[in-house]
Amino acid sequence: MDYKATLDFLFSQLPMFQRSGPAAYKNTLENTLKLDENYGHPHRKYKTIHVAGTNGKGSVSHMLAAILQATGYKTGLYTSPHLKDFRERIKIDGETIPETVVTNWVSNFITNNELWKIQPSFFELTVALAFDYFAEQEVDVAIMEVGLGGRLDSTNIITPDVSVITNIGLDHVNLLGDTLEKIAAEKAGIIKTDVPVVIGTTQDATKPVFEQKAEQVGAPIYFADQEYEVPYSLMGTDGKQHLHVEKNGTAAFKELKLDLLGQYQHKNIPAVLKSVEILNEKGYAITEESLRKGLAAVISTTGLLGRWQVLGNNPLIVCDTGHNEDGIKAIIAQLKNTAYKQLFFIFGTVGDKDPGKVLALLPKQAKYYFVKAPIARAMDAAELANRAAECGLKGEAYPSVIEAYKEAKNEADKNDLIFVGGSTFVVAEVL
């Protein structure tokens, strides 16, 4: 089996949420626990950090990874979904898992599974691969990003040094619940006995849910934004954000450089800083120098893609994977702080979510290119254009993301802005 055949097995023969949606979601950890037992409980062989949340968990995971790498720890990083290559999901010190490792591991699983008789989903098998690879490579610590929810997520068999929940928004309501409280209860499932938990954003609806769960299991709980705050930042000539960070109202970090753009990162930084503080209390040796070094080079250190990523200039071309209501609000806020003459908006979404609330948020002054990413879950471009028209958005449907992208670049002037987003899969096509 070569790498192409391996990917075909993973993507086509296993239930995959990104492709088939809720049908691939499991309401039990049974398969994950069986796989973990069969591979000798690999996640117990190194330290872990667990990161959940509706928005920002990818950025927080990568920032923590960059900081730990800058400190000198051999750092595993598991995230999802991938944008360009499956191997983006599993990295050690910023290097993706080799193709040969993926191919050999999957081949061995197929052989062993003739006896095991496990029927895993794509995500369950991918998590097992990550756990096993990190153990085989003897990482010092692995950061595990939750895929969906928390309580029933395949990553939720670890006992981490710290758990992080960035925020709660209305996303995947058909699976996690239709209120913030219900979704918070699912994500609170990662809170473990005696393991400190950091909540990135304090919300009236969800705070009691987290406090109750933490009290039940005896977990110390910290609301990061009640201690740390980023009141402002400036763009430096080096192309990085220069953050002014306060702790309890007093300056804590001046000129803290961050190469991730987007003002919404201001909300992620408190969770990162509080987590670092807790890790040091647990015996880690993260200095301010390594913290600064890591944050200043998150992209080059970890290979993070799709977070207010600048793809070109004259015209300015930006993509962002924010796709739910809160994510789009953050993008709109960033657009308002960006100078441009005209806005060209390439937009697509999935078909198993009602796009109405997101469409209502989008700027009406823009010219839209409605697209369908090449996955079964994607909403038809013509249908999306019709729904958008009901919200006062003007534009046309295009047969492919790339065709829309080319047309927008042809039409845009050097002082204009082309934005690509609405779905991770739309951004993936452009990248």
Image: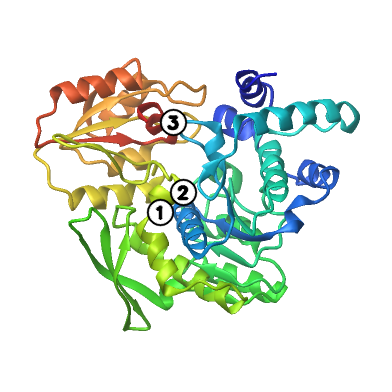
- Judging by the rendered image, the residue that carries numbered circle 1 is 298
Q: Residue 248's image quarter?
A: bottom left
| Residue 233: image location, x then y, percent | 24, 65
The residue drawn where x is 66% and y is 71% is 195
Report if the CB atoms under discs 2 and 1 are less than 8 Å apart. yes
Closer to the chain start, of discs 3 and 1, is: 1
Task: Determine if residue 397 is in view.
Answer: no
Q: Residue furthest front?
A: 72
Q: Residue at x 49, y 46 (%)?
A: 171
Q: Within 10 angstroms of label 1, few (less than 14), some, or many (20 or more) residues? A: many
In the picture of the structure, the residue carrying the numbered disc 3 is: 425
Does 55 appear above or below 102? Answer: below
Label at residue 302: 2
| Mark 2, other Cα within 10 Å: few <14 / some 14–19 / many ≥20 | many
Answer above or below: position of 364 versus 237: above
Above or below, comparing residue 151 to residue 117 in the picture: below
Residue at disc 1, secondary structure = helix
- Residue 88 placed where, x, y %? 52, 38
Mark 3 and mark 1: Cα distance apart in space? 22 Å
Q: Quadrant of residue 34?
A: top right
- Numbered circles on residues, count: 3
The structure residue drawn at horizontal position 32% and vertical position 50%, both measured from the top left corner, is: 329
To which quarter of the image does residue 51 belong?
Answer: bottom right
